Every structure is written in structure tokens, then in C-alpha cells.
Image: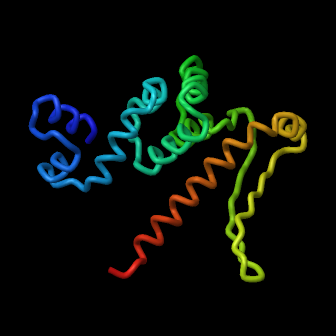
């Protein structure tokens, strides 16, 4: 989608995203997301060569980029590029968030409502033998939590927009 948009710009078939969306019959928001995803660092995009990059994963990558920045994201991507092996899109995203492959850290996020207050509960589980490493490197969890919260906020906003009466 982004490549078609860029090609159309170069050929002067349209001069804006709005024009491209109208000419192609696409939703402008989807086009904007596709272009934003295509502008992620090349090292990150290389990790997904030959894989279908779903919008959901693309959105997560954009949030990770927003939280950790370009330099850190490129550094994490290069770590994976140096050790080529088959990885799922979820494994790649987890690594970019700072979860190392060797780590068996599991994160669950629940929404709990009690006494008229809704809270997010983060539940981490890890093998006892790996706990010291995680406790020592606890600052590594901050980007994961920030990204997770950011994604939850985005989902809540989208849900509210869908349920608003028109």
C-alpha cells in the first residue's frame, strides 16, 4: 500500500494522502498507517522480509519506536539480524520490546474493576532460576510496560470511537 502511494506520488498521479486514498478507494487512515510503518528503520523492516506484517504488529512497532526511539530500535534489530534464524513476528516484536529470547518472562495484563475504579494489573511470571537476572535488569521492563500501556490506551480510544453514536 505504501509502495503504491509512493510510486503514485513520484508519477504525479496524486499529491497528497487524501488524493491517493480517494483515487484508489482506500481509507486514508489505513494508508497513513501503512506509510508510517514503511518509514520505520530499514533494519526493523528487514526482520519481516518474507513475512506478512499485519497492521496490528505494525501498530505495535510504531509504539515501540515511539517509546524506545530509533537508535535503540535499530540496535535491537541488528542483534537479531546478526543471529539469523526463523522467528515468528511475535518473537521479533518481543525482542524489539526488550524481552530476550533466552528469557522465559511471561507478561499478562488484566483489567480489574473494584470499588468503582478500573485498574490494569501487570502479572509477570518467570522461572525462579532466572529471577535474579530480571530483578538485576528491572529497568529493561520499563519500555515493555510503557509500550503495553500505550497500546492499551490506543485500543481503548479506538473502542470508544466505534461506540460513539453518530
Residue at the front extreme of this rendering: 15
Residue at 21% over, 38% down: 5
Which of the two residues, 127 or 3, is positioned nearer the viewer here? 3
Residue at 84% over, 44% down: 127
Residue at the top extreme of this rendering: 82
Badge count: 0
- On the rendered structure, is 91 left or right of 50? right
Find residue 94 and report its image quarter.
top right
Which of the two residues, 48 or 63, is positioned nearer the viewer here? 63
Residue at 43% over, 25% down: 42
The location of residue 29, given as percent across then percent down, is 32, 54
The location of residue 108, given as percent across then percent down, is 70, 57
Q: Quadrant of the N terminus?
A: top left
Relative to 30, residue 159 above or below: below
- On the rendered structure, is 141 left or right of 133? left
The location of residue 31, given as percent across then percent down, is 29, 47
How has the structure been colored for display?
Answer: rainbow
Q: Quadrant of the C terminus?
A: bottom left
The location of residue 160, given as percent across then percent down, is 47, 72
- On the rendered structure, is 40 left or right of 119? left
Amino acid at each position: 500500500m505504501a509502495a503504491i502511494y509512493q510510486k503514485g506520488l513520484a508519477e504525479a498521479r496524486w499529491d497528497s494522502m487524501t488524493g491517493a486514498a480517494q483515487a484508489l478507494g482506500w481509507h486514508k487512515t489505513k494508508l497513513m498507517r501503512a506509510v508510517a510503518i514503511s518509514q520505520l528503520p530499514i533494519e526493523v523492516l528487514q526482520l519481516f522480509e518474507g513475512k506478512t506484517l499485519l497492521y496490528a504488529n505494525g501498530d505495535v512497532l510504531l509504539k515501540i519506536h515511539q517509546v524506545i526511539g530509533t537508535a535503540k530500535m535499530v540496535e535491537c534489530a541488528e542483534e537479531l539480524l546478526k543471529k539469523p534464524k526463523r522467528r515468528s513476528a511475535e518473537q521479533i516484536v518481543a525482542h524489539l520490546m526488550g524481552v530476550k529470547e533466552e528469557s522465559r518472562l511471561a507478561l499478562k495484563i488484566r483489567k480489574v474493576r473494584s470499588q468503582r475504579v478500573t485498574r490494569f494489573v501487570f502479572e509477570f511470571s518467570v522461572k525462579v532460576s532466572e529471577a535474579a537476572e530480571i530483578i538485576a535488569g528491572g529497568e529493561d521492563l520499563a519500555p515493555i510496560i510503557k509500550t503495553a500501556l500505550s497500546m492499551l490506551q490506543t485500543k481503548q480510544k479506538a473502542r470508544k470511537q466505534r461506540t460513539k453514536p453518530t
